[in-house]
Image (cartoon, grey):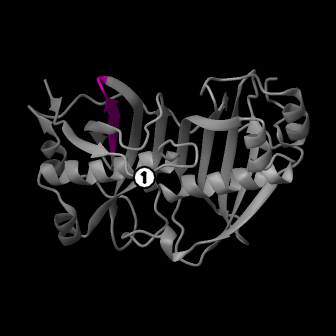
């Protein structure tokens, strides 16, 4: 029976990886995942230099992250990662963030094998498939769930423009997949300001939205100096949680680059525990909620 080769790496949280709440920033979990994936591939004989020689690379199609416990400055944690499924042009890599014997976060990325020049999918070579497993290849897994169908747009949308900066772009020459989470954070803060809930107002009431789950689907790539726009609205509003959908598009053409669903929980900053969404907050955001949202 095929067994995936597992790779583990110890990290220590650095100060600049944390946000003002004292937690590791959401996007940095994805950056840890990228680093672990690169090292795991190198450990089975496929490092960056070998991929460059082959003229191939892996690009993400769908990433999911479930945040169970907040990692904080100075924490030492382990990432364990393995390839769970591989077929034709795609590979599903799974990640666990382990701290003190508990799983702080779980994640997966569905990667697509690409020709580096054309950026078109190519079949994964048999020897590359075999490198990730002991005792043969696994049986094909069930069909992977697609990105959730977005609900209808809210009556009032917030569209936040962004021109791709040099710092957004990685070695592959496009906006790094983790950077989209950072852009969505910026857009969320602009939404709060637009609806009367600036960061300062939230902090004055000891309230904060934290991400419990993130799902991102990458449709195409954005590059340096591209003019993007991020449209966002709320859905599935419940007692202390809500989902926010994001659509990153090219300005002008409207081509969809990335779409995402982030599931938020409102917490009390003092206790770190979920709290009921105040009625005034619900009222102020009402026009930015999809009409199909559950109240």
In the image, residue 228 lies at what x, y percent?
A: 66, 67
Depth check: 128 or 181 in front?
181
**Quadrant of the image containing the N terminus:** top left
Q: Is residue 295 left or right of residue 182?
A: right
Q: Is residue 85 visible?
A: no
In the image, residue 280 lies at what x, y percent?
A: 89, 32
Magenta span main SS: strand
Q: Is residue 292 visible?
A: yes
Depth check: 81 or 58 in front?
81
Depth check: 225 or 239 in front?
239
In the image, residue 254 lies at what x, y percent?
A: 71, 64
Report the residue that reaches farthest toward the left: 135
Q: Is residue 93 left or right of residue 258?
A: left
Q: Does residue 16 belong to the magenta stretch?
A: no
In the image, residue 34 lies at what x, y percent?
A: 35, 52
**Quadrant of the image containing the C terminus:** top right
The residues colored magenta run: 91-101
The image quadrant that residue 118 belongs to is bottom left
Which residue corresponds to the image point at 75% horizontal and 34% vertical from the top-left?
235
To which residue does mark 1 refer?
15
Which residue corresponds to the image point at 40% horizontal and 67% vertical from the top-left?
119
Q: Is residue 82 above or below residue 227?
A: above
Q: Identify the element where label 1 is drawn.
A: helix
Q: Is residue 44 left or right of residue 33?
A: left
Which residue corresponds to the image point at 68% horizontal and 35% vertical from the top-left?
243
Report the residue that reaches farthest toward the bottom: 225
Q: How many marks?
A: 1
Q: Is residue 24 above or below residue 236?
A: below
Q: Does residue 99 belong to the magenta stretch?
A: yes
Mark 1 crowdedness (10 Å alpha carbons): few <14, some 14-19, many ≥20? few
């Amino acid at each position: 029976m095929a067994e995936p080769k597992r790779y583990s790496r110890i990290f220590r949280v650095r100060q600049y990886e944390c946000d003002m709440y004292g937690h590791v920033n959401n996007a940095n979990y994805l950056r840890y995942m990228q680093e672990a994936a690169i090292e795991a591939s190198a450990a089975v004989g496929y490092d960056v230099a070998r991929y460059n020689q082959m003229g191939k690379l892996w690009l993400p199609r769908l990433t999911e992250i479930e945040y169970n416990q907040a990692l904080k400055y100075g924490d030492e944690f382990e990432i364990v990662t393995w390839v769970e499924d591989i077929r034709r042009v795609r590979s599903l890599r799974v990640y666990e963030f382990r701290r003190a014997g508990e799983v702080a976060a779980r994640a997966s990325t569905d990667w697509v094998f690409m020709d580096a020049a054309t950026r078109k999918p190519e079949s994964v070579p048999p020897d590359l498939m075999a490198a990730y497993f002991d005792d043969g290849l696994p049986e094909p897994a069930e069909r992977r769930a697609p990105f959730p169908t977005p609900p209808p747009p809210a009556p009032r949308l917030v569209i936040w423009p962004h021109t791709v900066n040099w710092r957004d772009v990685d070695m592959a020459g496009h906006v790094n997949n983790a950077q989209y989470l950072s852009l969505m954070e910026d857009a969320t803060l602009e939404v709060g300001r637009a609806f009367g809930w600036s960061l300062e107002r939230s902090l004055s009431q000891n309230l904060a939205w934290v991400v419990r789950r993130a799902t991102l689907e990458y449709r195409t790539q954005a590059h340096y100096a591209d003019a993007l726009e991020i449209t966002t609205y709320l859905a599935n509003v419940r007692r202390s949680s809500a989902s926010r959908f994001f659509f990153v598009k090219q300005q002008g053409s409207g081509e969809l680059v990335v779409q995402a669903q982030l599931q938020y929980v409102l917490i009390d900053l003092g206790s770190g525990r979920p709290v009921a969404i105040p009625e005034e907050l619900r009222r102020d955001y009402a026009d930015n909620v999809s009409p199909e949202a559950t109240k």
